[in-house]
Image: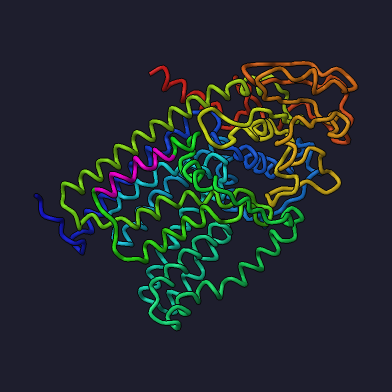
């Protein structure tokens, strides 16, 4: 039998650096599937893209809807919106979304490798996090949360270092970094601070020591709270009652939330197939504080409220941290034989590559499911108002409702409006003025498309209706319309209807967008044409 590896020390710096570089290579491979479909398979991504485009067009003379909106710069989603605003003029809004998410997933994997190393593990154990990259937060399009997640992990690293060597300078730095993470995403900051506090409690030697460890977070909470009051608490949308929805399904659904695979049993088997060989080959740590940290992580992913301050899907998104925290409970690789260590790392590498290949296949299926919308988009005149009536919100290969807001890509690409919209009262970059609020509201109508009523939802305001349904539904939907609503285009499960009556609205309906279209019918600077051309070149070899 081979001898155990030597303990890590100064001589282990270069091997660790090479291992971090290898994790970075896997990170670059892991983000490739994002670029396969024309549009990312992310539920909220078109809403965020629309917010960015509307914000950038508010002062443009060719944008006819400026008077409908107010700007809300204190949005808690700035971590997602700022890079999108910076990248959109350079690469287009679709490519900007993909670049930002790619950087977030890549950063999450590197941050996990840093966290594992800080806790005495091998950086390559960060590959355990690969199946979670395309889990619940990705599929639901929580771009701000994804961007903030790597910083949340970095906060744990800095907190551990501060706990080991407390100092005034270190405490100030940790408190400032906590505020930075909080401004990126409040839920990420609260989660990371909670884990850090639990770890400090598990490794406590005296009450005075514990207070000194918690002090950097405690003293910054009032500042964070003041920002929260001004940015979120004043919005009526946040005053909805807290939702718990506690039931036994949460225990099985956690595997769905981790992997994003449709089917609880398959998701469970995938996770077991990943971790069981690693546990057998490496074993588990004997220090109980690591299990306290992992237990806290699991408790958040299972028992946290579902809705808080108007934010939905709270506990589900925390599943992305489960596998990184589980990696901390594994025994350091240098305590086992080289053969076992190589087998463990080899299994992680193979599983990660196979998983990435599976995600790439799922993205290919998603592109086939979504291609009908691209056909509809080319038939739609720019600058119009559209109502999304979505009966088919899910994909066959993803657990999340990735098609829920899909028609909103029209707003992002052709400078029109699509309802329901995040501007209907959420804490986002631009919001509808109270007097301009549409009848088809966000967080309501999109889940009940069968409730559409021409008079109640003011169907006469819309020129186009995008219907996603396996069967033709126009005859029933528009039976009470005052003028004919004709079927303009149809492909697969996507249906485009056009209102032929003059639109009764105080807002002018522009006939042309504030930019030229390319040969594919997309705005010249939206970035979609480049993505389509790149994919066509790959397909042709």
**Image spot of residue 180 (x, y percent):** 53, 62
Q: Is any atom of residue 4 visible in this view?
A: yes
Magenta-drawn stretch contains 279: yes
**Image spot of residue 456 (x, y percent):** 87, 34
Q: Is residue 464 left or right of residue 85?
A: right
Q: Residue furthest left?
A: 1
Q: Say which of 406 and 209 sits in front.
A: 209
**Majority secondary structure in the magenta region:** helix
Q: Residue furthest front?
A: 248
Q: Is any atom of residue 413 visible in this view?
A: no
Q: Is residue 453 left or right of residue 125?
A: right
In this view, 11 is above or below 475:
below
What residue do we see at 45% from left, 45% from top? 105
Q: Say which of 420 and 270 sits in front.
A: 270
Q: Say which of 315 and 12 sits in front.
A: 315
In this view, 310 is above or below 170:
above
What residue do we see at 26% from left, 48% from top? 280
Region rendered in magenta: 268-280
Quadrant assignment, res 476: top right
Magenta-drawn stretch contains 264: no
């Amino acid at each position: 039998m081979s001898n155990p590896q030597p303990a890590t020390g100064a001589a282990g710096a270069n091997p660790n650096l090479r291992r971090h570089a290898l994790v970075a290579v896997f990170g670059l491979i892991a983000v490739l599937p994002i670029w396969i479909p024309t549009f990312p398979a992310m539920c909220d991504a078109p809403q965020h893209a629309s917010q960015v485009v509307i914000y950038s067009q508010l002062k443009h003379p060719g944008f006819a809807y400026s008077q409908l909106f107010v700007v809300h710069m204190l949005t808690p989603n700035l971590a997602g919106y700022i890079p999108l605003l910076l990248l959109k003029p350079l690469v287009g809004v679709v490519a900007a979304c993909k670049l930002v998410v790619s950087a977030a997933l890549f950063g999450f994997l590197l941050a996990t490798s840093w966290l594992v190393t800080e806790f005495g593990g091998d950086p390559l154990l960060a590959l355990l996090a690969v199946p979670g990259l395309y889990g619940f937060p990705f599929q639901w399009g929580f771009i701000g949360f994804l961007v903030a997640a790597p910083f949340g992990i970095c906060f744990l690293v800095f907190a551990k270092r501060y706990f080991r060597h407390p100092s005034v300078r270190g405490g100030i730095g940790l408190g400032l970094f906590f505020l930075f993470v909080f401004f990126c995403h409040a839920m990420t900051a609260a989660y990371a601070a909670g884990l850090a506090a639990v770890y400090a409690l598990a490794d406590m030697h005296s009450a005075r020591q514990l207070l000194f460890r918690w002090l950097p977070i405690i003293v910054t909470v009032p500042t964070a709270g003041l920002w929260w009051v001004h940015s979120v608490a004043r919005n009526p949308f946040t005053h909805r009652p807290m939702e718990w929805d506690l039931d036994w399904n949460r225990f099985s659904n956690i595997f769905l939330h981790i992997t994003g695979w449709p089917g609880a049993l398959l998701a469970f088997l995938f996770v077991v197939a990943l971790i069981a060989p690693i546990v057998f080959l490496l074993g588990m740590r004997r220090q109980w504080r690591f299990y306290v940290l992992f237990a806290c992580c699991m408790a958040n992913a299972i028992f946290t409220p579902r809705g808080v301050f108007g934010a939905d899907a709270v506990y589900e998104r925390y599943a992305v941290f489960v596998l990184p925290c589980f990696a901390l409970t594994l025994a350091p690789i240098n305590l086992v034989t080289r053969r076992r260590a190589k087998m463990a790392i080899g299994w992680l590498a193979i599983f990660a590559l196979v998983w990435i290949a599976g995600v790439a296949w799922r993205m290919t299926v998603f592109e086939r499911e979504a291609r009908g919308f691209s056909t509809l988009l080319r038939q739609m005149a720019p600058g119009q108002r559209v109502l999304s009536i979505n009966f088919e919100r899910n994909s066959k290969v993803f657990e999340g409702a990735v098609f829920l807001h899909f028609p909103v890509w029209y707003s992002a690409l052709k400078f029109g409006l699509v309802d329901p919209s995040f501007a209907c009262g959420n804490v986002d970059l631009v919001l509808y003025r109270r007097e301009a609020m549409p009848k088809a509201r966000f967080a309501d109508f999109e889940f009940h498309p069968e409730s559409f009523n021409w008079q109640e939802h003011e169907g006469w305001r819309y020129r186009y209706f995008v219907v996603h349904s396996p069967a033709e539904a126009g005859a029933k939907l528009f039976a009470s319309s005052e003028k004919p609503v004709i079927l303009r285009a149809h492909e697969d499960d996507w249906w485009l209807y056009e209102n032929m009556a003059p639109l009764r609205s105080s807002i002018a309906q522009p006939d042309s967008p504030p930019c030229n279209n390319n040969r594919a019918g997309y705005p010249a600077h939206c970035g979609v044409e480049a993505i389509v051309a790149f994919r066509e070149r790959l397909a042709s070899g």
